[in-house]
Structures are given as structure tokens and as C-alpha cells.
Image: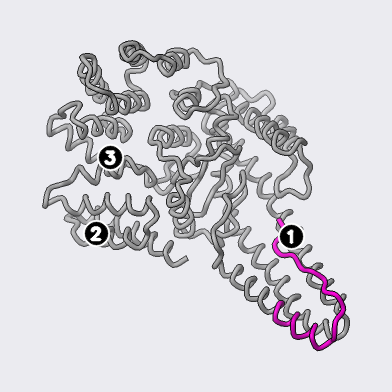
Amino acid sequence: MKLFTFFSPRRQSTRGLRAGQGISLLAVALILFSFARGDILIGDLPNLGQQDIRAQNQETGAGLRYLSFLNAQGMTTQDPGLTYYLEQSTLPLLPAFSSDGTSRDLIIFGINHRSFNAFALPGGLIGVHDGLLDMLTETSEVQAILAHELGHLALGHHQRLAQARRQSTGLVIASILLAPLAWQVDPDLAIGMIYGAQGTAIQQQLAFSRSMEEEADRMAVTAMRSGGLPLNGLIGAYEAMASAQRFQSGTAGTPYPTTHPDVRARLADLRNRIEGDPAADAMAPDIPLCWIQLDRGLTVRADDQRCEQYAAWHQANDTAERYALWHEILDGHAASPYLLFRAADWLTNQATSEDREALAERLISYGELVPDNWLAALGLMQLHKEGVIELPQRQWSQWRTILMAEAPANDLLAWNTLRLAYPGEHERHRAFRAQAQTTWINGDMDMAIRQLRRAAELSETNSERSRWESQLRNWERAQQR
């Protein structure tokens, strides 16, 4: 990436050159100093494995601010089913990255874009593009990408990259500040100093990024192996990456001048590392990727029997046939929170039918098989809120509590549902908490901070107040970026 472009001016009077060039160089120096401090406008999304250059440290606030911007621009995928799928795909990987095998602060979200892309942000945030899911065949390949991004976070690549860029930026700034003095001797020498410093800085950053990509690849192998996941998912993911790269550029790529190693070299290294590994035959996950691809309108690439009925449901035009197919699908996957939510979401938006009540009651019984699951809670609460079913007060209270504790930070439907689920005067603090999250997701950080502060003030328990105050500090740091 070319950070700055300098034009060699034609020879004019020495006095005019000194004055004009001095102003120009001062302006560029100020821009670079702002860059070093992190005061940079948000623009394009990061690339696969590439850390966002605007995140200059590991503070949670930097990533939250960027995510809030993406939300406000409508770039994030507000699909609870996709969020749940990504969460579940990540769970087997976590033991390799945290001492207790969990990560309460991890936020994984979808991006409405058809490019083959995923990225990590400071504070434990990972974005996955629709285009990446469209090109993959198995969930193990999605897990390979997630493992790679988790590797960047676990290895502290944000901090290391920021340090390298600060050093490189300092080199450029020093050359720019010295250039006016050199100009008095030889204008060509001044231009050469700037170009030389710029080129050296860029080369340092590219090399650093390549080494980090290779480190994250090795970390992904370790995480997949420790989680008992199919290591051939790594091969499939990188083959898809190479295919996407050829499609986009007409070439398989070269190791220069990109920030990433040649995909072919990475594939060769991965094959050497996993050859003969028994984990390559590990059991497939509970949620096949094809369900996600069907629901997202993406390309289904796997030949999986679990997809046949679900694909038939998507293709059916007759409502009665769709009801019948749902019963057949649920017969084989009664304890699937994902399918329970999808069925409930479909029912919520259907006209009244004699089959509607029967299917809704069936979903309530299936909800008892997964009593602590936030996605199942969201599906049943939606049915209750829309008047499709009437949940007993005990179950309504139970599902509300589960959703409040487990709802993903970036799920607008979940937090909007919670916002309306606490109308009572004695529960205003929870209503404020949910309202604050929906406001943050919509991109209004100032208002979200005020609402969350009010929720903490009204909280009746120390544990709730402590959690919300911690979140408040994160948002306040994000606002200061």
C-alpha cells in the first residue's frame, strides 16, 4: 500500500521552492504524526489475516469503535443464526488460546460483503465475510480461518505491528523534517531522502506482516489439532483462498509486494505439518455449513445428506409443504437450537395457519431440550412477543434471564427483544441495559454510554453492576479513540 505520493517539482526560483516545499512537508509531517498517534479516519475493511492499521494497541476500545462504525454503515450481518454458528465453530478452538477454554470478551460477527475475507481487531473481535462462507465447503474450513485469526490475537500481533509501524513512521517523519535542510543543498537529494525512507518503512512493514501470517498459520494447526478438528480443513480453506485470489487477480499470486506469503507456499507448509495426522478424520460439527449457505443465499458446495431436507424446504413454494418439511427436519434434529430458531423465525413471519399452532407447541417442547441456549431463547421469545404462542410466566422469565446473560454483543434482534421484555418499573435497569446495547449497535456511542451508565446506577445487584460498569469503561475508551 502506498502511504504517500510525492511529486518532484519543476525547477523554479530557489526562494519559491523553499517556501512551497516547506509548507508541503510540514503538512505531511503533521499527517504522519497524527498517524503515529492513531488519529486516523476509518476506511476500508482489513484483509484476510491483516490487522487493521488504525488499531495501534490492544485496547478493547479500539476494536469496539471500529465495530460500531461498521454497524452504523450497515456492513455487519444482523443474523443471530450466523452469529451462533460462528460462536459454536469457535468453541473447540478456545482451549488453545485461553487457560479456561472460554473467552467472554470474544465478539465474532458477519460482514455483508462477497469478498473472500476475514479479519481480527484488538479486544477479541473477528469479522467473517459472506464471500468467505460462499467459497468454503465444510465447517472445518471455517474453523481453520477462525483459528488463524485467533492466532493473531493470541500472539499479540496488534501490539507488535503497531510498534513496528511507529518505528517506521518515525523514520519517515525524521526524513521529512530534515528534507527542507537538504533542499537548500540539492532538491533532488531531499526528494530522494523522502522516497528512500518511505520505501524502507513499507518494506519493513510488509516483511513483518508476512512473518505474522506464518506464525498465525502455525498457531491454527496447533489449535485445530488440540480441538480434535479435521486438519484437512486448513488445506481446504487455503485452496479456496488461492482460488479466490486467482479469480480476483488472474494469478495465483507472488510473495511480493503483498503483505501475505504466497498462498502456494503456505499450502505446502501446511501439508507438511499435517501429513498423516489422525485428527484429519475427526467428527463433523452439529451445524453443517450448508445450512448457513442456504439461509444466507450462498453457494452450497458440500454433498451432505443433512442438507437435502433443508434445501427442499428452501425450494418449496407451498406453505403446507413447508410446514410438513419442518416437522421432518425437526424429527432428525430435535435438539438443534439453530433449527429451532430458524423455524421460530419463519413462524413469526407467517400468516395464521391451522398448522402454525402445532409447530409452535412443538418448538416449545424442543426448547426444553436446550434450556440454557440463548438462540433457542431468542426464537421462543420472538414467538411469544408476536403472539404466536403464550409462554408460561416461569418459562418467559427463564428465557429472558438466559438471553440477557448470553446474548452476543453485536446481535440487534436479541437486544431489541430484551429491550421490550422488561417493561416493569422494578426492571428498568435491565431495560436500560438492553437499550444501551441496541443504541451502540446502531452506532450512537454517546447515547449508549449514557444509557448504560443509567442502567448501572439503577442496578440492584453487585454482580450486574460490576459487569455493566466494566462494559461502560470499554465503551468510554472506545469513545476516546
Of 12 and 361, the residue lying toward us: 12
At label 3, counting other C-alpha atoms closer than 10 Å, the crowd grade (few under 14, some 14-19, many 20 or more) is many
Q: Which mark is residue 456?
A: 2
In the rendered structure, are the residues bearing label 2 and label 3 in contact, judged by CB atoms less than 8 Å apart? no
Of 268 and 323, the residue lying toward us: 323
Tag 1: amino acid = Ile
- Residue underneath mark 3: 403
Q: Which mark is residue 228?
A: none
Picture coordinates of residue 175 (x, y %)? 76, 75
At label 2, counting other C-alpha atoms closer than 10 Å, the crowd grade (few under 14, some 14-19, many 20 or more) is many
At a point 19% along the width and 56% down the height, the residue shown is: 459
Tag 3: amino acid = Leu
**What separation in Å lies between label 1 and label 3 (alpha carbons)?**
46 Å
Image quadrant in which you'd find residue 129: top right
Q: Earlier in the sequence, mark 1 or mark 3?
A: 1
- Residue underneath mark 1: 202
Image quadrant in which you'd find residue 41: bottom right
From what the image shows, is residue 286 above or below residue 323? below
Of 156 and 471, the residue lying toward us: 471
The secondary structure type at the circle numbered 2 is: helix
At a point 27% along the width and 59% down the height, the residue shown is: 451
Picture coordinates of residue 411 (x, y %)? 37, 42
From what the image shows, is residue 365 above or below residue 102? above
Query: Residues in magenta?
Result: 1-25
Magenta-span inclusion, residue 283: no
Tag 2: amino acid = Ala
